[in-house]
Image: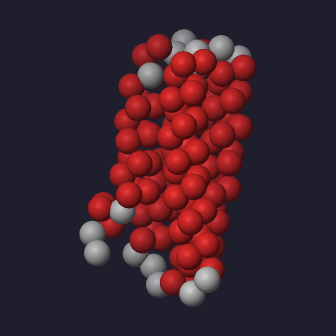
Amino acid sequence: MDEFDIPIFKKTYELYKEFYGFRNTVSKQDRYTIWQRCEDLILEILEYILGASQLSKIEKLPILQKASTKLNLLRVFLRLCKDTKVLDSKKYIRLEQNVDEIGRMLGGWIKSTRDR
């Protein structure tokens, strides 16, 4: 299986590209604090997903759970970006919809890994 063909990997990859595209709209002050933290979290989630795709079923679960924790942290930081006006509501909603979809995919993957 080609790990780059996994739908959740593609979705997370697209989330990063979209997030990165908003970078120039963020003030320098915010870009190197909370924005950088969000960017790092997305990249970590991408790493976990890619890593989990290459592991045996028994090894996958802890990695997927770490990805889920990072995704929840990303949700909090994105909401903080919206509440502090780093992100406008329109951009926040677009990113949050993608994060929600990734969350559903990740939840399904965790469930199917547990059920085996």
- Seen in the picture, residue 90 relative to 55 is either above or below; the reply is above
Quadrant occupied by the N terminus? bottom left
- Seen in the picture, residue 8 relative to 114 is either above or below; the reply is above
- The reply, left or right, for residue 84 in relation to residue 21 is right
Find residue 68 and report its horizontal and vertical position in percent. 63, 58
- The reply, left or right, for residue 77 in relation to residue 106 is right
Q: Is residue 67 visible?
A: no
Q: Residue at x 61, y 83 (%)?
A: 115
Q: Name the residue nearer the viewer: 37 or 10.
A: 10
- Seen in the picture, residue 68 relative to 18 is either above or below; the reply is below
Q: Name the residue nearer the viewer: 110 or 38.
A: 110
Coloring basis for residues: secondary structure
Find residue 80 and report its horizontal and vertical position in percent. 71, 27
Corner quadrant of residue 113: bottom right
Q: Residue at x 62, y 80 (%)?
A: 114
Find residue 21 and report its horizontal and vertical position in percent. 39, 25
Q: Is residue 13 visible?
A: yes
Q: Residue at x 56, y 76 (%)?
A: 112
Picture mark count: 0
Quadrant occupied by the C terminus? bottom right
Q: Residue at x 48, y 70 (%)?
A: 52
Find residue 92 and report its horizontal and vertical position in percent. 58, 25
